[in-house]
Amino acid sequence: MSSIICVPMGDPAGVGPEIVAATIGDPVVAGESIVVVGGEGTLRHAAEIMKVAPEIRRLDPRGSIRAQARPGLLNLVAVDESAISGFTFGKVQAACGRIAYDCIAKAVALAMAGEVDAVATTPINKEALKAAQVPFIGHTEIFASLTKTADPLTMFQVHDLRVFFLTRHLSLIDACRKVTKARLVDYIRRSTLALRQLGIDNASLAVAGLNPHCGEHGLFGDEEGREIVPAVAEAQAAGFNVVGPKPADSVFHFAAEGAWDAVLSLYHDQGHIATKMVDFHRTISLTLGMPILRTSVDHGTAFDIAGTGRVNPVSMVEAVRLAALYAGNFRRNADRAGD
């Protein structure tokens, strides 16, 4: 059965509309119904740039989106794009930041109402959001606010490697300060439950070490012995299938080979580098722990090539594919998030 995946078009000054237009006809996602929230003129221009011609079917917002959406088409929920008339590719513009946010807000509303099964997001620009006086720094914060989720989980997936993040956008020194027993136990529990929502029961999780060689018994850093080891022991006693700390220079490799279902990375670059070295274009970000499922490309607006047709759409294709892959299990297991 086709899933219905909602895609907000992103910042029109970036590559978002281009990768959306190119994704519609890709055979990998040909069986899914893709509902795009965006400006029709912007998307038609993006299709011309990418030399594709998706069939655009404008949906009636007064009716059920779910009932109208069809596979293989660009099912459009149109927004007013008059404010971005004459926008410039590759530039920070307040109007572009505003419409990007408005498209996300509409996509979230459709997902919360059950009209779509998941949301797969395109790139937005933090400076454009700020210029538009949107009070959020990025997608995760927007989704957290709109879904009333206190602390969403970020998980990256590339092929069969899944990586959760204990911290995201913090300086390295501040991220290290967040490596506490209480926070680790909470994230081990919530990461395991998030995997269960995706259909992975009794998921195995490995916690990455913070210091080289996990501190070598305190020779260079005591965070492992003081915070991580006690956290893993407490989580194990509570019945969670978790091990660690495991040295960060090997844990991702062994997880990619199937040793564990996922890794809990302790800070931003630790997990980002590990996943993107496997396959940069197919590294997909998932936001979990919310009442709706969100996947995303893990690249930016690429202002340097926006409007040129040189962008590779494979990450958008993969984001839609993963959203569709997990959407059914996520719906069925929605009531298990707090088990």
Image: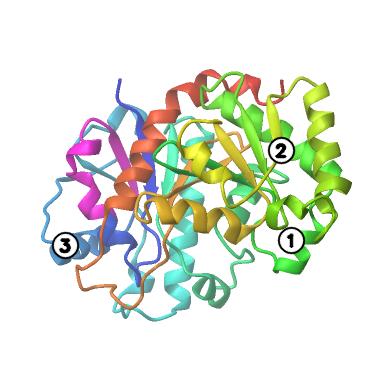
Outermost residue toward the right?
226
Specify the amino acid type for callout 2: Gly
Q: CA distance from mark 3 to mark 1?
A: 40 Å
- At horizontal 73% and vertical 45% (from top left) the residue drawn is 150
Name the element at disc 1. helix
Question: What residue type is disc 3 on?
Answer: Met
Is residue 266 or residue 191 the one in the foreground? 266
The crowding category of the residue bearing disc 3, from other C-alpha atoms within 10 Å (few below 14, some 14 to 19, many at least 20), is many
Q: Is residue 313 visible?
A: yes
* Secondary structure under the numbered disc 3 in the rendered image: helix
- Res. 32 image quadrant: top left
Give the quarter of the figure containing the C terminus: top right
Residue found at x 35% / y 41%: 320
- Colour setting: rainbow
Q: Which of label 2 and label 3 is nearer to you?
A: 2
Q: In the rendered image, which residue does mark 3 sit on?
A: 50
Quarter holding residue 155 = top right
User: For residue 316, which numbered disc appears in the image?
Assistant: none
Q: At x 68% / y 24%, what residue is drawn?
A: 241
Sequence order check: which comes first, mark 1 or mark 2? Answer: 1
* Picture layout, residue 301 above or below residue 238: below
What range is drawn magenta here?
Answer: 20-37
